[in-house]
């Protein structure tokens, strides 16, 4: 992919492992409202669609707004305590930055928490632009988020790659006519990822060195 100028990254499961933080905030909220706690794997599989959609299947409609507020208050602290970089992330970002690629983030996580985690893990300096679904009409897998980033950075689809960990990342890329590289080990299941026909599936994000 020698024509690539822009690499857009998903956040959770791609750059950052915040599953412990999410699980603690989620089950704290469940306990607060008298709902049963959920297994970490169940929560992990529900990640990727934004925090409102994370909670929605597990609480009554009448509790959702208040539960979301509780979750978010808890999550501010939980993120700072339990989130960490996925192995190899800083090395690949240093590499891409040195090669003069433009770098951006496209996430369904709310802007407040995306920026919080990027600052906390000292990733914010790498990215020219960060865009999250709460600023848009549609979240992933709708192509809007990727289309806006490309327009903002004046880059064409054929010059762009999207790096994620879930089937919705591959679908969003496909619907935007850009190539998707999916890193396994996040929230996605391999057969579901491959069903979306990404350009490439890799085990470790450092493998991007061999792609770009």
Image (cartoon, grey):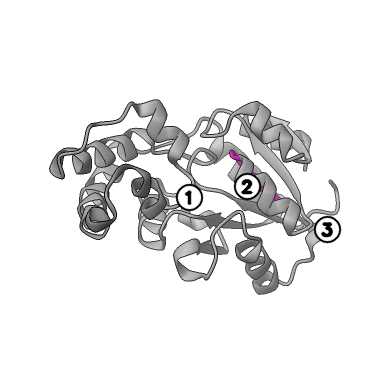
Mark 1 or 2: in front is 1
Q: Disc number at residue 203?
A: none
Mark positioned earlier in the residue sequence (3 or 2): 3
Check disc 3 and report its element: helix, strand or loop. helix
Mark 3 or 2: in front is 2
* Residue farthest along the right direction in this orientation: 2
> Cβ–Cβ below 8 Å for labels 1 and 3?
no
Q: Real-space Cα distance between discs 1 and 3?
A: 26 Å
Residue pointed to by mark 3: 158
Residue range in magenta is 162-166
Residue pointed to by mark 2: 169
When the figure is inspected, residue 86 is found, relative to residue 98, above or below; the finding is: above
**Residue 143 magenta-drawn?**
no
Q: Callout 2 environment at 10 Å: few (<14), some (14 to 19), or many (20+)?
A: many
When the figure is inspected, residue 3 is found, relative to residue 36, above or below; the finding is: below
> Cβ–Cβ below 8 Å for labels 3 and 2?
no
**Quadrant of residue 138 in the image?**
bottom right
Q: Residue, x 52% and y 41% (percent of image)?
A: 15
Q: Real-space Cα distance between discs 1 and 2?
A: 11 Å
Residue 152: x and y in percent read 65, 73
In-front residue for pair 201/70: 70
Residue pointed to by mark 1: 49
Mark positioned earlier in the residue sequence (1 or 3): 1
């Amino acid at each position: 992919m020698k024509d690539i100028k822009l690499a857009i990254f998903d956040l959770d499961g791609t750059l950052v492992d915040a599953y412990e933080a999410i699980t603690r905030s989620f089950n704290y909220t469940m306990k607060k409202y008298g709902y049963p706690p959920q297994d970490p794997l169940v929560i992990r599989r529900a990640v990727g669609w934004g925090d409102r959609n994370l909670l929605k299947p597990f609480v009554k409609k009448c509790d959702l707004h208040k539960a979301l507020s509780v979750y978010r208050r808890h999550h501010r602290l939980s993120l700072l305590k339990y989130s960490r970089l996925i192995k190899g992330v800083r090395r690949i970002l240093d590499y891409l930055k040195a090669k003069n690629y433009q770098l951006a983030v496209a996430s369904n996580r709310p802007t407040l928490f995306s920026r919080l985690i990027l600052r906390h893990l000292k990733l914010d300096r790498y990215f020219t632009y960060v865009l999250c679904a709460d600023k848009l009409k549609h979240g992933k897998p709708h192509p809007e988020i990727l289309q806006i980033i490309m327009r903002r950075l004046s880059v064409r689809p054929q010059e762009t790659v999207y790096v994620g960990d879930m089937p919705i990342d591959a679908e969003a890329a496909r619907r935007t006519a850009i190539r998707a590289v999916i890193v396994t080990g996040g929230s996605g299941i391999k057969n579901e990822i491959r069903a979306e026909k990404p350009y490439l599936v890799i085990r470790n994000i450092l493998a991007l060195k061999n792609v770009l």
